[in-house]
DNA sequence: CTGAATCCTTCACGATACTG
DNA sequence: CAGTATCGTGAAGGATTCAG
């Protein structure tokens, strides 16, 4: 009884519903799956090929979660071999914009992030070398 | 030499830069940290208290990653006890809008997701019960 | 073809203790 | 206060096999 859901939506609270909902889409693969389904219905195998690097297991898991949350509709045609089609529900469609915004940002700031990374890493590298140098000097 | 970076930004390719950038912000805590820093500079302890449920380790880790990617600036004041302040860089500021879009979505679709979940789970529960019933019947 | 189930490895993460 | 270092555990995820 203690772990009541927050009715007031402070996303900084751990048990806040909006936080939980946010976590549903804040993972490795979910944005990519959403984005892949933006164009319309896709079969399991199509998604598997489209999203390079995802394993069958993760794709299944991600799709199941999306289905459970009402974002994706799964339709099974009882034929052999099986045909299963995935598509965004109306609710899922509303996610396209936020996800696309993210992707546009990622694409739009490639260089800046890459540059920041090398700068940061070189700085680290430099500190490391100075540290080693001072150690050598102590002998 | 084989693992060249994609110059053409197809986010569905595993080695695509934009995909890698996307992954940097698609985790549990990053959106919350960004959102927390939206209001301005915050100290480590403040962030720790504000973001309920995050551990020191994860906060440090998340902040380091954000700093490395040039999204967050870290300023250390050489006083005792130490004071460390975090704030969004100009680049980091550009992430506010995408992140906020996500959070607005999460908040705006609480009910729908919650309802979809219970429906899905009840369906599962029902199938489970039917399965058990049929098993009992077989005796 | 579309999964479910199993095994197994890795590592993400929390807890704890320690430091400047 | 703001971390780092270390350890231990549980969960995530890949590979493989089996099934409808």
Image (cartoon, coloured by chain):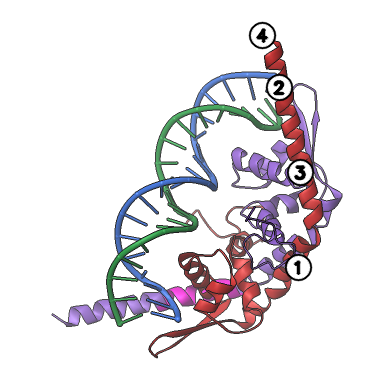
Chain colours: A purple, B red, C green, D blue
Q: Can residue B78 be seen in this view?
A: yes
C-alpha gap between disc 1 and disc 3 = 26 Å
Numbered label attached to residue B139:
4
Residue A73 in which image quadrant: top right
Percent of width and height locating residue D20? 70, 19
* CA separation in Å, label 4 and label 1: 56 Å
Front: mark 4 or 1: 4
Nearer-N-terminus badge (2/1)? 1
Residue B55, percent across and down?
49, 65
Callout 1 environment at 10 Å: few (<14), some (14 to 19), or many (20+)?
A: some
Q: Mark 2 points at which residue?
A: B131
Q: Is residue B108 above or below residue A30?
A: below
Looking at marks 4 and 1 on the same chain, the residue that comes earlier in the sequence is marked by 1
Identify which residue, B44 or A125, lies in the foreground: B44
* Alpha carbon distance from label 2 to label 1: 43 Å
For label 1, the SS is: helix
Give the label, 2 or 1, closer to the camera: 2
User: Camera-side residue: B6 or B127?
Assistant: B127
Q: Mark 3, residues whose alpha carbon is within 10 Å: few (<14), some, or many (≥20)?
A: few
| Circle 4 or circle 3, nearest the eye | 4
Which residue is identified by label 1?
B101
For residue B128, what is the image quadrant? top right
10 Å neighbourhood of mark 4: few (<14), some, or many (≥20)?
A: few
Subunit ID for the residue under disc 2 = B
Residue at 13 percent of width and 80 percent of height: A139
The earlier-in-sequence mark between 3 and 2 is: 3
Mark 3: secondary structure: helix
Which residue is label 3 attached to? B118
Q: What stretch is highlighted in magenta?
A: A112-123
Q: Toward the viewer: B27 or A80?
A: B27
């Amino acid at each position: 009884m203690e772990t009541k859901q927050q009715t007031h939506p402070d996303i900084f609270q751990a048990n806040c519903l909006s936080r939980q909902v946010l976590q549903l889409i804040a993972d490795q693969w979910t944005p990519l799956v959403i984005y892949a389904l933006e164009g319309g219905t896709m079969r399991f195998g199509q998604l598997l090929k489209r999203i390079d690097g995802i394993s069958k297991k993760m794709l299944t898991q991600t799709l199941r979660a999306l289905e459970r949350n009402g974002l994706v509709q799964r339709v099974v045609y009882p034929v052999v071999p099986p045909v299963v089609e995935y598509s965004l529900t109306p609710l899922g469609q509303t996610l396209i914009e936020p996800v696309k915004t993210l992707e546009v940002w990622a694409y739009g700031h490639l260089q800046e992030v890459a540059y920041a990374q090398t700068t940061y890493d070189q700085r680290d590298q430099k500190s490391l070398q100075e540290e080693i140098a001072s150690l050598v000097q102590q002998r």
